[in-house]
Image (cartoon, rainbow, N blue to C red):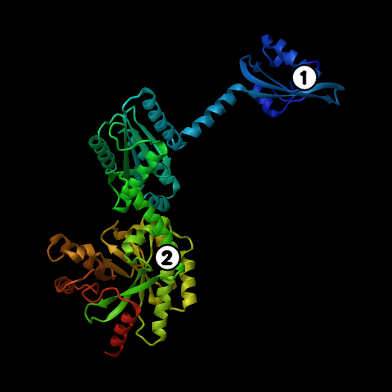
Amino acid sequence: MSTKGHIVATNRAFRDLIGVKEHQPLTDEGIIVPTYLPCFREKFGQVLKDKHNVTIEVKGLHYEGYPQDWFVHIHQPLDFEQEQETGCVIYIQDHYAKRHMAEEIHYMSYYDDMTGLPNRRKLMQHINDLLRMAKEKDESIYISVLYMDIDRFKRINDTFGPDFGDMLLLQIAERLLRKMNPHDVLARMEGDEFACVLTTVKSDQHVAEQARQLLRMMDEPFLLRDIPVHVAMSIGVTIYSEDGGRIQQEDAASLVKKAVSAMSKVKEQGKNSFLFYTPEMDVVSLERLTLEHEMRNALLNNEYELYYQPQVEMNTERIIGMEALIRWNHPHKGRIPPGEFIPLAEESGFIVTLGEWVLEQACIQNKRWQDAGLPPIPVSVNLSVRQFEQKNLMEVVQEVLRRTGLPPQYLELEITETMTLDVDRASKVLSQLKQMGVSISIDDFGTGYSSLHYLKNFPIHRLKIDRSFVRDLEHDPNDAAIVSAIIALGHTMNIHVIAEGVENTGQLRFLQEHACDEIQGYYFSPPIPVPEIEMMLQDQLVS
């Protein structure tokens, strides 16, 4: 703007702000409400004289006549060569836009953009405010924090994609909100984790009932793109009660941390439940962190080894395959059961590295046996969900077979039914494995999301009847019916059927009568180390 009040040049943003075209002549009188002109011209002259930048608030004029609130930044003078006079550069900021932006930034700082719920920061602030107000007023207080994690959410998200997962989280948030009292606060903490702060529930018994109701709300499936999706939650609960004397000198961070510890304990114990925090959980959490560290180092220190459990043909009782099972020999704690470290490996993501080690070691050992002249039989290796979801799974399997020299027909990969939820991807991966020459078996059949569709369309070599059905088939008519139906189904579709967990003659007799193809279990042999399985294969070679 020149010293005469003529606007020499404008940018597009300014023209859009006041609603004028590019070549339309403008003066200060045309863009500023008259009552604000004296102030503007005074500050403009001051900048020309003192050569210091100035910012003022004025009301600007839109071309259609309505006022706008502006911040006007008048910068030091400069010469306009074309006009042969002096002027200033003026930056105009829409007050409403700035205020709106500030409000939006504030909102994003305290609320989750997707669900609209308070976020972690807002929840922590709310808890600390409650504690502070209770202290200032010297009032008794009872606060419960429930920390909720959606079980198996990652599986759903990885199977159907993040958009599907976001839709599910929105529906979960809406459903949880329906159980909240107006004075309670529900927040989305991160990912698939939510937390609520209850101040209207005043006893442990009532908090427990609230947790049960939240769990029951998940019983009804969510409908997403016409697909019914079943989810469950793990809930950790911590209580602050000034009168109870249980927790003193607490703040939001410590309360939430303890609720998270309780939630993690629920997940360890099987999920879909709730637990109140106890101090012992902190010890358990430390033990889990230590175990995870030791579990990773164990691979470097050669503490793992593979045991093998024979798979026996029913009619001949000859070993026709074996399953590779990992064991951990801890230098100080002795043998650590797989049930203790495998779930931790899955949770931490280490299962991918550990699973690849098992795959390679099993192939190396099988090739050694064949090179030694022992009967060539396939070895079965379990694939974890995370391994199956790896985009480079095919390359990993191909590279292991190449390095070890094991022919692909002597490798069988065991997957679970839940891995086939994404039908298109599962079909593609399994078909590629079949083309490579690798066999596929469905482990724990009957316990997951059974579908005749994938039995018909996926290249499956064997079905493994889950041990939970085999265990009680002598005494439970339902289990007996399930086992006989699985055998009949497999035979109808030209799929071999193997029963795992066979432990006694009664179970064996039932399976023989129903023409089960193969068995695996302690009745024939437990999982055994390499020297013992070699002796069994040697005996079979000479018999």
Secondary element at tag 1? helix
Q: CA distance from mark 2 to mark 1?
A: 70 Å
Instruction: Judge by depth and name the residue closer to the eye, 156 or 277.
Output: 277
Location of mark 1 (residue): 47
The label number, if any, that marks residue 165 in the structure image: none
**Residue 354: mark:** 2
Quadrant including the N terminus: top right
Q: Amino acid at mark 1?
A: Val
Quarter containing the C terminus:
bottom left
* Left/right of residue 205 with respect to residue 324 in the rendered view: left
Q: Position of residue 398 (x, y in %)?
A: 48, 71
- 465 with respect to 37 (left or right): left
> Callout 2: helix, strand or loop?
helix
Task: Give the mark nearer the N terminus: 2 vs 1.
Answer: 1
Check disc 1: other Cα within 10 Å, few if <14, some if 14-19, many if 20+: some
Whether residue 115 is visible: yes
Res. 485 image quadrant: bottom left
> Which residue in the rendered view is the most extreme toward the bottom?
542
